[in-house]
Image: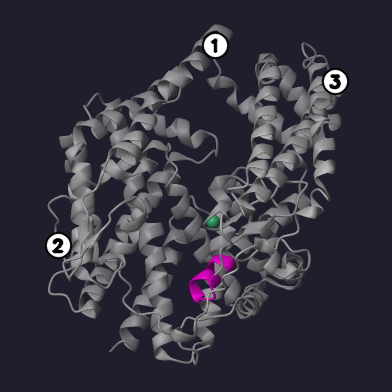
Amino acid sequence: MDEVKMDQVKVDQFSNRNEIPEAFRWNLSLVYPSLESWEADFAKVDSHVRRVEEFKGKLGSGALTMKEAFEAQVNLDLLIEKLYSYAHHSSDEDTRDSAKLGRVDRIRGEATKAGARLSWFEPELLEIPVEQLNSLSRDPLLRDFSRKLELLIRSKPHQRSAEVEEILALASEPMDGAYKAFSLLENADMKFQDAVDAQGKNCELNHATYGAYLESDDRELRRSAFGNYIREFSKYQNTFAATIDSHVKKQVFYARARRFNSAIEASLFSDAVPLTVYNGLIDTVNRFLPLLHRWVGLKKRVLGLSEMEIFDQFVPMVKPTRTELPYEEGCRLVREAVRPLGEEYGSALEKAFTERWIDVFYTPGKRSGAYSGGMYLTKPYILLNHKHNLGSTFTLAHELGHSLHTHFSNASQHYTTANYPIFLAEVASTTNEMLLHFHLYEKAESREMKLYLLDHLFTQFRSTLYRQVQFAEFERDIHAMVERGEPLTAESLSDHFESLNARYYGPEMKRHKNIRFEWSRIPHFYYNFYVYKYSTSFAAAQYFAKGIYEGDTKLRDSYLGFLKSGSSRDPIDTLIRAGMDLRGPEPIEAAFQVFEDALNEFERLSK
Ligand SMILES: [Zn+2]
């Protein structure tokens, strides 16, 4: 592909779906062959709810009753998922189509109604004494539900009396005000002053254009976009400090109400992630900050800047002049790249094409971006807006990673343990991206292509490992501040963010006077200790991809076992069984070895 020039790129422009050959459109008729069949299933929801209602007041009356109740609930969930899956995929084909949107609304409404009618189910389960749950979890009749019961037993110590639980449930809506205020202020009320490019032209600045301007070659545009964007946030710093303070206090309140030692322990509880894993990740990444500092220095030299500014970090070091790649060629490369995963993986991958899981091209009204979706009873469908280039090919590899993970877990697990947790979700997708990276690197004929691939990899390390851990550290610290009774103010938040930023980027990154306010624009600080999962997933993927690419068949087999394990164990245990122990620093250190090797290689090639 090195021979192809950028000016030959033609992005397919179809004005409607019928112009696209069938092979490049997903086949939703595998879910429902007709709208009538969807309607016929929709009409069954009520009787499925009634079937579950028959067990009201009886859940604790024995193993057989409990099994039948769980099965009735699973059947209802499967039906709703299937109806919803079809409705939403079909609506994503053209989001302007009101009939399609109508079906999404109808099934959502029906699911909400079912949830309200069955709101007694969980509390009734939680009423069952722990000794009884223990013996039920060992009953062979309930084998398919033993994991569910195990998790229920584990949550018992954090369950309060019926009266307290009722008040906690009533408090949940008014407690959500902080994030609502944050997103209204940020999305609806704030207006940004236009950015100005090197020619003096005004460029409209909003959340959508901001990212593109920062990747622009025009340094004046980058400077202006960053400056105007962050200045607008700085104006509301006291309000944003109040919304964060209120959110963190909510987390601390719930943690204390549920008898956890801290908000962070309460958040890590559902994944059973030890606090030492969270803290260990931050410590290890901090030990490897010199590599990020080295990258800052390298970028400064390659871009030919006398000073590296915070808004210079996003512009590529290597121009993608030769990345044109037709879709079918991209598919072929992905097939080749995942070959080290073996026969079983390869033949499952073929199903994505032969069973038409993928909706490839853009048409007007189609949902933007890319995702892997699908449910237990459907194919793991993929939506793309594919452009014939290398970036889109990485996206294809990524989404196929998710879909194959879903495919293997669904095929190997009972419904109750099929759905893999968010903690593990990005492992399979990033492993595929890395396998594609190694494969392309090996095949690359030109120095330019190699540099381009290394630069692409640096971006992933910067954004997924360093940046997310910087956020994870900030998040941990501000919760601890509130727990110690220290106030979260614009001043204290900005001081702490600024010191973290200086430590992470190092001495060669020039200090921008407004970078201290950047915390105020990050929505993830309202997501309850979520961002670190990107980093652990990314590190795990580096570990698996490198070993598998280098031909470690034992690791490959345990990785396939991982893909089949769904949520049958705690995520940390799932990874340990696959050969990766996040309780120690080694896997994160191994990921940094990949980064260091790439830095060495880039420096060698760019001399
Ligand atoms: Zn993903």
> Which residue is at 32% across, 26% downward?
246
- Name the residue carrying label 3: 65
Identify which amino acid the numbered label 3 is placed on: Thr
- Secondary structure of the magenta portion, mostly? helix
Q: Is residue 392 magenta?
A: yes
Along the horizontal axis of the image, is 146 left or right of 453?
right
Describe the element under mark 3 as helix, strand or loop: helix
Expressed as whole percent of the image width and height from the top left, the position of residue 116 reads: 66, 19
Q: Are marks 2 and 3 in contact (CB under 8 Å)?
A: no
Expressed as whole percent of the image width and height from the top left, the position of residue 314 reads: 31, 65
- Name the residue carrying label 2: 510
> Which residue is at 76% across, 59% downward?
27
Expressed as whole percent of the image width and height from the top left, the position of residue 389 reads: 51, 76
Q: Earlier in the sequence, mark 1 or mark 3?
A: 3
Along the horizontal axis of the image, is 146 left or right of 582?
right
**Which label number is shown at residue 166?**
1
Bounds of the magenta segment: 387-397
- Which of 48 and 369 lies nearest the eye of the viewer? 369
The answer to whether 508 is drawn above or below residue 564 in the figure is below
Q: CA distance from mark 1 to mark 2?
A: 52 Å
